[in-house]
Amino acid sequence: MSDRRASMNLYPWACLLVLTVLLHGCGGGAGVSGSSMTISACMDPAGVDARDIQRNLNAIRNARLCYRRQQVREGPFRWVFHILEHPKAPKGPFWVLPHDNENTAFDAAVYAVATYGGGLLAVDSGGRRHFLGQDPNRNFSSSRAESRLCRDQRLPAPGYTAAVLNHYKGRRGPYLALHNNYDGWQGNGGRGTISLYRETRSSRGFPAQHADAQLRDEDNLVFIAGPRALSADSAVRRRISALNAVGLNVVYKRVDRRSFDCSLSDYIARHAVGEYYNIEAEYGQRQAQQQMIDRLMQALGIQPLRRAPVSPFLGG
Ligand SMILES: [Zn+2]
């Protein structure tokens, strides 16, 4: 007993209380079976069996972030989400990381939470992109009819969707995501599917005019989405200009019934839930991704948390 108490000294708010919430399948005759969700209190991150957490243990401890484990059961899926929150500024910007193989994005997200407060949710898929054959970022839908629009969603997932989006309840500010992608795209000899220069029926890139060297890379861009054509949406055109002005490339996707793919961006656009920004960076370009976070926060008017003065003589 004394050992346990000693090990929890760092986390005085830790306790064994687990909140259980039953999420029923969104009703409305959708015919979707129920799901359940549990989320732990703050736990010692040292004991968490996940490489993302262990790789960032020092940064998590230095910022005294609260680690919580969330589990969502829905159909055959037993999802595990790793949650990190800044205890002094828990209502700050909140980041979703659907892909467990995108380690650069996770590391950059820890930097974001330590610097700006808020929190992050990272899906645990055992270090891979897919979990039981399901891409976690093609799993946002609230009914069977909606799910049918998406080729890559196996089953409707209203419980999963609500569990992720509930983290934004009572939080001001936008929906945020972080991803990594491979160099270039298949259309220009590269390996990836994401690029500033890839134009499709529904998406188009807007290069920043005066981007720094690394931020000029076609793989480093802010992805946003909306239900309207750009010509009919002056608010989105202003958002693109504001991002370009701080040196960020932008890709805009127009989401309609044909292009909706059950990703988080598309779900938020389709349901007009709020503003969404996804910072995409090439694998391994952590400095670039962190710089992009700083630029986006600047564009959104979100300040870094005040740090303790370096010297007691500078205090006040
Ligand atoms: Zn991704």
Image (cartoon, grey):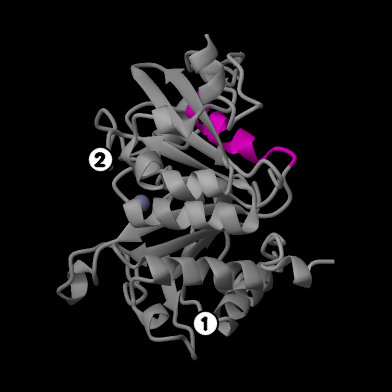
Task: Look at 55% across and 29% down and name the residue there.
Answer: 163
The residue closer to the viewer here, 145 or 175, is 175
Which residue is depicted at the point 52% across and 82% down?
Answer: 247
Q: Nearer the viewer, residue 123 or 62?
A: 62
Quadrant (top left, top right, bottom left, bottom right) of the C terminus:
bottom right
SS of the residue at dot 2? Answer: loop
In the image: residue 303, left or right of residue 190? right
Q: In the shown orientation, is residue 35 left or right of residue 101?
A: right
Name which residue type carries label 2. Answer: Arg
Residue 232 placement: quadrant: bottom right
The stretch drawn in magenta includes residue 57: no
Label 2, on which residue? Answer: 128
Q: Are marks 2 and 1 in contact (CB under 8 Å)?
A: no
> In the shown orientation, is residue 170 left or right of residue 193?
right
Residue 245 visible in image:
yes
Please tell me whether the stretch drawn in magenta is mainly helix, strand or loop.
Answer: helix
Please tell me in which quadrant of the rendered image residue 183 appears: bottom left
Element assignment for label 1: loop
Categorize mark 1 by other alpha carbons within 10 Å: few (<14), some (14-19), many (20+): many
Q: Residue furthest front?
A: 313
Please state which amino acid type lies under the numbered disc 1.
Gly
Which image quadrant for residue 218?
A: bottom left
Structural crowding at the residue carrying mark 2, measured as other residues with C-alpha within 10 Å and reported as few (<14), some (14–19) or many (≥20) = few
Q: Is mark 1 within 8 Å of ligand 1?
A: no
In the image, farthest residue toward the bottom: 210
Q: Over which residues does the magenta segment extend?
A: 158-170
The numbered dot on residue 37 is none
Q: Circle 1 sits on which residue?
A: 247
Q: Where is residue 92? Give x, y as percent.
A: 68, 51
Q: How many marks?
A: 2
Residue at horizontal 48 percent and vertical 17 percent from the top: 32
Q: CA distance from mark 2 to mark 1?
A: 32 Å
